[in-house]
Amino acid sequence: MNISRKLIYAVAVVALAAVVLILLELLITTDEERILARLDALVAAGEAGDTQAVMELIAPEYDHAGLTREGWNSIAEGYFTFYGPTEVKVLSKEVRVEGKLAVLDIAIFTRSSGTMGFSCRSRWVLSWRKQNDEWWIRQIEPRSFEGQPVDGLPEEIRRLEHK
């Protein structure tokens, strides 16, 4: 075999390997990417005022800090009824994945469209659990509103659970 034929084979092998690597990169989704896709779905649900889409992301067995999944459903319905769909901009996000658990720390800017409109910057920590190859929100914890630290959901939000 002459040198030019060896070179053609070598280039072909390298090109094939590159194509395989590109295809693998396109086909394989990391857990971090899956969680960020779920965050995108949560943002879209908030912008559409879609309570059902929000609830599709919260774990069926959610029970944290005195709130169940049904409590979050009431809060979402009350919020969208009172404030309407809400513009949501993710200002920063950081995902940490450890096995079947993950934490998403996000800072967001929200502006509601309802008659009682408002805008607010806030920071949240969402804890996730992977179950049956799907990521579910298992805890929702606000950390700050307009730069002021908070311990739990503000009363204004908790009241929406009962409207």
Image (cartoon, rainbow, N blue to C red):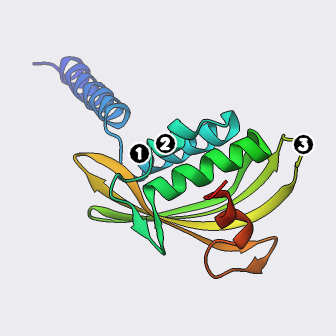
Tell me the residue at 31%/38% (across/down). 28
| Numbered mark located on residue 115 in the image | 3
Counting from the top left corner in percent of width and height, residue 5 is at 19, 17
Sequence-wise first label, 3 or 2:
2
Q: Kindly check if marks 2 and 1 are in contact, taking CB atoms under 8 A apart as contact.
A: yes
Across and down, in percent, residue 135 comes to: 36, 50
- Residue plotted at (84% across, 41% down): 114
Amino acid type of the residue that numbered disc 3 sits on in the rendered structure: Thr
Q: Nearer the viewer, residue 73 or 127?
A: 73
Circle 1 or circle 3, nearest the eye: 3
Instruction: Give the camera-side residue of 27 and 130.
Output: 130
**Tag 1 near tag 3, CB within 8 Å:** no
Quadrant the N terminus occupies? top left
Regarding mark 3 in the picture, which secondary structure is present there?
A: loop
Say what amino acid the circle numbered 2 marks.
Ala
- The numbered mark at residue 37 is 2
**Farthest front residue?**
163
Residue drawn 64% across the image and 66% down it:
158
Q: Which mark is residue 34?
A: 1
